Amino acid sequence: MTYPEQVKAHLWADIHKMSESPGQFAKNPGTDFSRKRKLDFENLLRFLISRHSGTTGHELLKYFNYDDGVITNSAFFQQRGKLLPDVFRHLLLRFNSHFPFQLYNGKYQLIACDGCEFNIVRNPDDPDSFYPSNGQSFRGFNMVHTTSLFDLISKRYLDCIVMKGRLKNEFRSICDLADRFPYGGSPVFIADRGFSCYNFFAHAMENSIFFLVRSKDINARRLLNLQTLPERLDEHVDIILTRSQSKKDRKRPDLCKQYRYVSAEVAFDYIEHGSGDEYPLSLRVVRVEVAEGVYENLITNLPNDELSPDELKHWYHMRWGIETSFRDLKHSIGAINFLSKKVEYIEQEIWGRLILFDFCAIIALHVALKKKGTKYVYQLNFSMAMKICHHFISLHSGAPPPDVVGLIGKFTLPIRPLRSYARQHRFQLPASFCHRFS
């Protein structure tokens, strides 16, 4: 059995194991998935993971090999409506557990956390996801927001929270992801300045998680109690968080410079509103030069005796890997091509694509490149690798598999260092089902 076939066997075995007790993943245990149907629990999960971007009817026809007894679209939606929301997260964690993650220096698991938006079919009747016309998108659009954890070395998604666009709260999401992080080890959450908050720092420390978060200048100045920031710095700062501004309520008035007030409007889960409790935090603030004359601030709890500012700068630069993963997730394996208009079903499809992404990444990173004596160092064409793996996982009923490893090895790209492009900002458009021709 080839390595890709082993990976596929692991995934299908996990789904089969879950299908032996479908009641724990169904909205109505004992009733849902109790009858024998052509699209049972096992085939439903397989279909949602391996499908391509055609219409629902065509994808079902392909999955059942154009059998004239193929189920109807209505039956498919009735079946998927029985699933609990966390069924795919359970499968993702179970599947990832078979394949060890690559660690930095054999110790740290580098994990990027970031948000991503998915435009869905326009529905003005859903105020939690609908954005009205803003002068650029004249009809308005609907959107869901995801906050994901992504392993930067192993190139795999670890967890995700899906919310309707107008309900998104990245501060809350990253705290929840830290609280439920199931992988153990020495994880390092790397995030941009949209996640910099005391609440996350506290949640990470309470769960024995390291973090490396970019911060705005104004937040770094307040943290260090400075009027201006030097070009470079690497300092530890001990602060005491409190909900009270009254100096007489402070338990250690001799440390008045360390107190930081957290207002009632700001979430902080370890001090109740109106209480006199205090919460100490010990942080490390690093300021590095990222381009000529351009400096950024990084807040962390990583030890300075193990990791220098230059190494932390390199780690934060690696965070861009989650941005490129969003591109492959959306376009290479078609996460933006939804079968449904309902947000509940769209969440299922996003999770299915995350599992498919991890399946492709595990196989692709197993391929060894052999190019030597060339001008550039080469890397895999990850986009092509995903398309090949997507085709491979969709084969069933005895169809002969291609040489997946050999095909992936044929598509490579040169690594050109110091190349960068300006980030393009595009206005949002309402999504439609016009993509579904295949």
Image: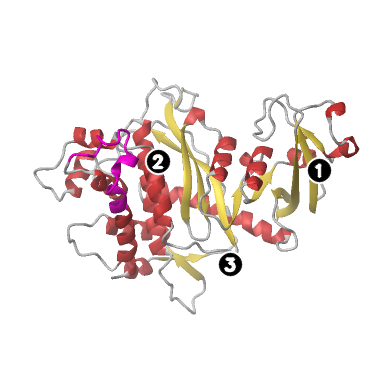
Which residue does the numbered mark 3 point to in the structure image? Answer: 106
Residue at horizontal 80 percent and vertical 52 percent from the top: 235
Q: Which mark is residue 96?
A: none
Instruction: Give the crowd class for mark 2: few <14, some 14-19, many >=20 residues within 10 Å.
Output: some
Alpha-carbon span between mark 1 and mark 2: 41 Å
Precedes in sequence: disc 3 or disc 2: 2
Asked if labels 1 and 3 touch by Cβ distance under 8 angstroms, the answer is no
Image quarter of the C terminus: top left
Q: Is residue 237 above or below residue 254?
A: below
Image coordinates of residue 372 in percent, x first then y, are 47, 78
**In this view, the mark in front (1 or 2):** 2
Residue at horizontal 46 percent and vertical 48 percent from the top: 326
Which residue does the numbered mark 2 point to in the structure image? Answer: 86
**Label 2 is placed on what type of residue?**
Asp
* Residue that lies at the very extreme toward the left in this rendered image: 68
Mark 2 lies on a secondary structure that is: loop
Q: Quadrant of residue 316?
A: bottom right
Image coordinates of residue 168 in percent, x first then y, are 52, 32
Q: Residue 123: say if magenta.
A: no
**Label 1 is placed on what type of residue?**
Leu
Does 396 sit left or right of 187 as displayed? Answer: left
Specify start and end residues of the magenta stretch as a single range. 15-35
**Label 3 is placed on what type of residue?**
Gly
Which residue does the numbered mark 1 point to in the structure image? Answer: 224
Precedes in sequence: disc 1 or disc 2: 2
